[in-house]
């Protein structure tokens, strides 16, 4: 089984901020303590990657993914009856072309929060997608169980 986000999932992720369905992210540093947060810049980067624009580079999320790249996100749109989780490995990206693409693909309101583009890009390689308690997509070799 491979990870290839469907058009439905890609549209849901890319429109989450403007649709009023914020995506919740979790990460945990070396100490294992999980932390939750909303990132309005969440977007698809490819059919197997998610991107975020982190407008503040001293955010705890960036420090945690340096220590432990394992992250998860949850999307929920109750009226559309669409809920899913994505698990993956996150990394900060300093490549100027990637940063430009991620920033420019973020919602306009999010761009206005960092008009000088002082932030950085994060790319998440998706390891599995979970829906209704079942793994529906997984990167080859991923043996993670659904939660």
Image (spheres, rainbow, N blue to C red):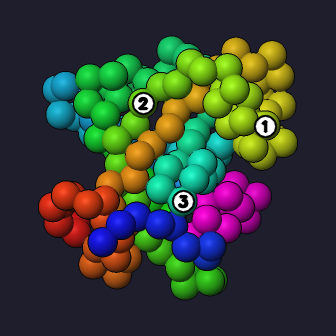
The image quarter in which residue 70 lies: top left
Please name the predominant secondary structure of the magenta segment in the image.
Answer: helix
Disc with the residue nearer the chain's start (3 vs 1): 3
- Position of residue 85 measured from the top left corner of the image (x, y, whole percent): 40, 64
Element type at mark 1:
helix
- Mark identifier at residue 93: none
Residue at 62 percent across and 83 percent down: it is 80
Within-10-Å neighbours for mark 3: few <14, some 14–19, many 20+: some
- Position of residue 88 measured from the top left corner of the image (x, y, whole percent): 35, 49
Q: Is residue 66 above or below residue 53?
A: above
Q: CA distance from mark 2 to mark 3?
A: 17 Å
The image quarter in which residue 53 lies: top right
Q: Is residue 127 above or below residue 78?
A: above
Residue at 40 percent across and 37 percent down: it is 90
Element type at mark 2:
strand
> What's the magenta region?
9-20
Q: What quarter of the picture does the N terminus occupy?
A: bottom left
Identify residue for label 2. Answer: 91
Within-10-Å neighbours for mark 1: few <14, some 14–19, many 20+: some
The image quarter in which residue 147 lies: bottom left
Side (left or right) of 131 relative to 114: left
- Mark identifier at residue 47: 3
Question: In the rendered structure, are the residues bearing label 1 and label 2 in contact, judged by CB atoms less than 8 Å apart?
Answer: no
Within-10-Å neighbours for mark 2: few <14, some 14–19, many 20+: some
- Mark identifier at residue 104: 1
Side (left or right) of 80 relative to 68: right
Q: CA distance from mark 3 to mark 1?
A: 18 Å
- Position of residue 7 measured from the top left corner of the image (x, y, whole percent): 62, 73
């Amino acid at each position: 089984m491979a990870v290839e986000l469907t058009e439905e999932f890609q549209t849901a992720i890319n429109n989450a901020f403007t649709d009023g369905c914020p995506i919740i992210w979790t990460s945990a540093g070396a100490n294992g303590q999980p932390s939750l947060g909303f990132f309005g810049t969440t977007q698809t980067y490819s059919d197997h990657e998610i991107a975020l624009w982190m407008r503040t580079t001293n955010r705890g999320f960036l420090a945690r993914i340096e220590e432990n790249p394992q992250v998860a996100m949850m999307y929920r749109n109750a009226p559309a009856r669409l809920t899913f989780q994505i698990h993956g490995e996150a990394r900060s990206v300093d490549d100027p072309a990637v940063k430009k693409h991620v920033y420019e693909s973020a919602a306009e309101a999010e761009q206005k929060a960092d008009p000088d583009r002082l932030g950085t890009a994060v790319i998440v390689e998706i390891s599995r997608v979970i829906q209704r308690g079942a793994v529906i997509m997984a990167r080859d070799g991923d043996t993670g169980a659904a939660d």
